[in-house]
Image: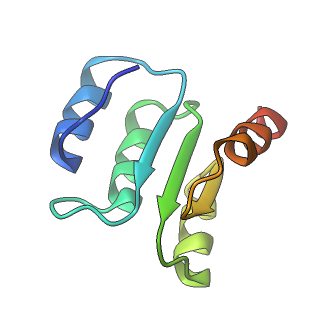
Amino acid sequence: METAASGQAAKAKIESQVYDLIISDIGMPDLTGIELLEHARATQNRTPFILMTAVPTMTTAIQAVNLGLTVISSRPILWWKIFARWSRAR
């Protein structure tokens, strides 16, 4: 498991390595989770991608699903639900 301190740092990691799963917040100060998802789809098209958000909106959810999002989850995060959704999506 690896972490990134910012959206730009996550973007750089995605460019340099293939991951089994990417988990990101939608609201980051330097890059949105949607932008990171777009970048991931351009470089690692098949990597499952999970987005977390404190304020889910239908517009964001539709946009993310159209980009190939695996799971979107609102906070608080219930990891067993995330794992169950990810397992079904694989």
Horizontal relation, residue 48 to residue 8: left or right: right
Q: Residue at x 35, y 45 (%)?
A: 39
Quarter occupied by residue 43: top left
Q: Residue at x 65, y 51 (%)?
A: 78
Q: Residue at x 33, y 58 (%)?
A: 35
Q: Residue at x 17, y 38 (%)?
A: 9
Horizontal relation, residue 60 to residue 42: left or right: right
Q: Quadrant of the N terminus?
A: top left
When the figure is inspected, residue 60 is found, relative to residue 40, above or below; the finding is below
Image position, residue 77 (x, y; %): 58, 54
Quarter occupied by residue 79: top right
Image position, residue 8 (x, y; %): 17, 45
Q: Nearer the viewer, residue 24 or 64?
A: 24
Image position, residue 12 (x, y; %): 19, 32
Q: Residue furthest right?
A: 88
Count the marks: how many? Answer: 0
